[in-house]
Image (cartoon, grey):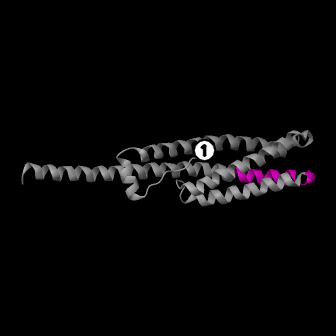
Amino acid sequence: MTIWSWAGVAGAALLFFWGIGAYNRLMSLRNVIGEAFVQLDAHLKDRGEVCDKLLAAVAPRLSSEQATFDALASAQAESQAAALASRSKPWAPDPVGSLAVASALHAAALTRLLSLLDHQPELRSETEIDGLVSELKLIERQRAFARQVFNQAVGQYNEALHQFPTRVLANLYGFSEARSL
């Protein structure tokens, strides 16, 4: 074999091993997105449980605000359905996009309920309701942090996805850009 043959074999081997490394890096970053979503999903579940308890505690006492309660319950159901759809592929843009919209609707409905409770001091003075509101605010802070971690993982994955020459491999293997929340 000539030196050019050896160079060709070495170049092909180098390209092959680079391809394996780039593929594994993208898969690793995609797995980080999945791990971050697990944490976020746990906070979404906790938020849903506390919202249900808060609605059960407040709704009988403020029957005139049924539209607010219905909006929150509907937003909660949409958020849970979108989270369920995102669990299998949290790097897929469509289900995560639906979750982003549902989370925004849920946050708006929750803000309306909390604003309503701020104008009802007799309800807020009850320990059960005040405890649920405090717990909900804590969960929201934790969820915001988990969302930030998820978005950072998505950003790292997307950055790696768009780097040359990894972009060529990503197109070949069907890697697509992830969506942040």
Q: Which residue is mark 1?
A: 147
In what quadrant of the picture does the N terminus appear?
A: bottom left
User: In the drawing, does residue 44 fall left or right of residue 32?
Assistant: right
User: In the drawing, does residue 20 fall left or right of residue 144?
Assistant: left
Residue drawn 69% across the image and 44% down it: 139
Question: Magenta segment range?
Answer: 46-64
Relative to the observer, which residue lies in front, 72 or 57?
A: 72
The correct choice, above or below, for 46 with respect to 115 in the image is below
Residue drawn 53% across the image and 58% down it: 89
Relative to the observer, which residue lies in front, 127 or 163?
A: 163
Q: Position of residue 177 (x, y in %)?
A: 49, 51
Q: Magenta region, mostly helix, strand or loop? A: helix
User: In the drawing, does residue 33 fall left or right of residue 43?
Assistant: left
Q: Position of residue 57 (x, y in %)?
A: 85, 52
Residue drawn 53% across the image and 56% down it: 92
Q: Position of residue 109 (x, y in %)?
A: 78, 49
Going by the numbered disc 1, the residue's amino acid type is Arg
